[in-house]
Image (cartoon, rainbow, N blue to C red):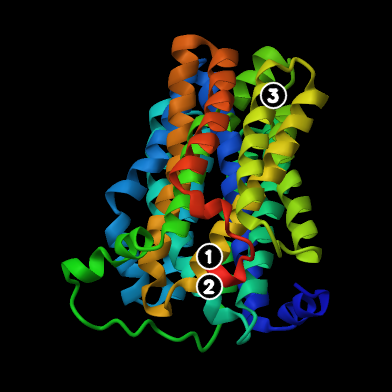
Amino acid sequence: MHIENTYSLFKHKPFLLFFGACGFSELAYQIAFVALGWQVYALSGSAFDLGLIGLIQFIPSVVLVFVIGQAADKYPRRPLVQICQLVEGATALFLSVGSFLGWLSVTNIFIAVGVLGIAMAFEGPAATALLPSVVPKGFLKEGTTVGSSIYQIGAISGPAMGGLAFAASPTLPFIMMFVLWISSALLNQGIKNIPVPSQNQSPSSDSIFAGVVFIKNNPLILGTLSLDLFAVLLGGATTLLPIYAKDILNTGPLGLGMLRSAPAFGALLMTLYLTRFPLNKLVGLKMFQSVICFGFATVIFAYSKEIWLSMLALFVMGAVDMVSVIIRSSLVQLSTPDDMRGRVNAVNFLFINASNQLGGFESGMMAALLGTVPSVAIGGIGTVMIALVWMKLFPSLILVDKLEENSK
C-alpha cells in the first residue's frame, strides 16, 4: 500500500469520522475489560470467574449469529452501529453508578458484561460491513489495513488508560467508557449518504445461512478462519493477566494495563510495517510461521517471572497475530459482495469472538484445574500443534503466494 493512498483516506471525511468512531469504541472496550477483569478478581479472587467474563461475552455471538448477520444486511448499518454504542454507553453509566455507590457486585458485573456482549455482537459485523461504504472507490484494501490499525491504537492506549484510571478511582474507568461510547455514536451521526443494503426480501433459510455457505465454499477463508480460531482459543493468555499482574509479577492495575497494551503495541507496529511493506509473496507460509511463533511466545510468557520479559513475549504475540488478522480481513472484505457482507462478517466475528472470548473461558477453567502457568504453557504448545496439523489439512493455504490473487 502506498503512503499517499493512506493520506488520501484521511482527507475523506466519511472515513475520518468512521475511523474516529471505531477508535473511540475500541478504546472504551479495552478500558472496560481491564477494569472489569481487575474488579472481578478483586471481589472474588477466582480464575474461574475471570474465565466467565469471556464466556458471557461469547454467548450472544453464537446464539444470535444469524440474526446479527441478517440485521446488518437488511437494515441501515450506521444507525444499527449507533444504537449499539448508545446501549454500551448506558451500560457504562450503570457500572459507574454501581461503583460510585458501592453496590457493584460480581453478579452485577456479569449482567453488564452480558449486555455489552449483545451490543458488541451486533456492532462488530455492522461496522465492518459499513467500512466499504466510507472509503473512496478503489481504496478498500487500504481501508481494511488502516482500519485494523484503529483497533490496535485503542488496544494499546485503552488498557494503560484503564489501569491508570482504576488506580486513581474504581469509578473513573466506567465514566471514561460512557463518554467514549457516546462520542462514538455522535461521530457516526456525521457520516452522510451511506447506501442502504439492497436486501428487501423476507429472510429465508438460504439467505440466513448465506454467510456460512460462502465461507464453506471458500477453502482458503475456511482454513484461515479455523486456524485463527483454534490457535487463539488454545493460546489466549490475556484473560489470566490479572492473575499474572497481581500474584506472579507482583504489579498493580497500572502494570496490568501495561501488560494488556503490549500485544496491541506489537500488533500496531506490525500493521505499520505491513502498510509500508505489504504481504506480496509467500502469504500462506508466513501465516503458518506466525502462528507457530505465537505459540512459542505464549510458552515463554507462561514461565516468565519478570515483567519486561512478559511484556516482550506479549509484544511478539500481538505482532505475529496481526499477520493472520490482515490476511483474514483482506480475504473476507475483498471477496464478499456488499449485500451479504453483514452475514459473512457475522460468521467471521463469531470465529474471532470464539477464539478470544471462549478462549478466555477455556483459559480460566484450565487455570482453575491445573494452575495458571501450566494452563498457559499447554495452550502455547497446543497452538504450535494446531498449526502443524492445519498445514496437513489445508495444504492449499501454504501455496498462497499473493493475497490479491486469492481474494478475487
Q: Quadrant of residue 340 in the image? A: bottom left
Q: Amino acid at mark 2?
A: Leu
Vertical side of 6 occupied by 43: above or below: above
Residue neighbourhood size for the residue with mark 1, other residues' Cα within 10 Å, grouped as few (<14), some (14–19), many (≥20) = many
CB atoms at circles 1 and 2 under 8 Å apart? Answer: yes
Q: CA distance from mark 3 to mark 2?
A: 35 Å
Q: Amino acid at mark 3?
A: Phe
For residue 405, side relative to residue 195 (left or right): right
Residue neighbourhood size for the residue with mark 3, other residues' Cα within 10 Å, grouped as few (<14), some (14–19), many (≥20) = many
Where is residue 70 drawn, in percent x and y?
A: 30, 68
For residue 400, side relative to residue 108 (left or right): right
The residue sitting at 50% across, 55% down in the picture is: 396
The residue sitting at 79% across, 18% down in the picture is: 306
| Relative depth, front residue between 58 and 299 | 299
| Picture quarter with the N terminus | bottom right
Asked whether residue 100 appears in the rendered view, the answer is: no
Q: Amino acid at mark 1?
A: Leu
SS at mark 1 in the image: helix
Location of mark 1 (residue): 331
Location of mark 2 (residue): 334
| Relative depth, front residue between 319 and 63 | 319
| Relative depth, front residue between 402 and 310 | 402
Location of mark 3 (residue): 301
Where is residue 147 drawn, in percent x and y?
A: 64, 65
SS at mark 2 in the image: helix
Of discs 1 and 3, which sits in the foreground?
1
Vertical side of 20 occupied by 326: above or below: above
SS at mark 3 in the image: helix
Vertical side of 198 occupied by 241: above or below: above
Q: CA distance from mark 1 to mark 3?
A: 31 Å
Which callout, 3 or 2, points at the residue further toward the start of the chain? Answer: 3
Residue neighbourhood size for the residue with mark 2, other residues' Cα within 10 Å, grouped as few (<14), some (14–19), many (≥20) = some
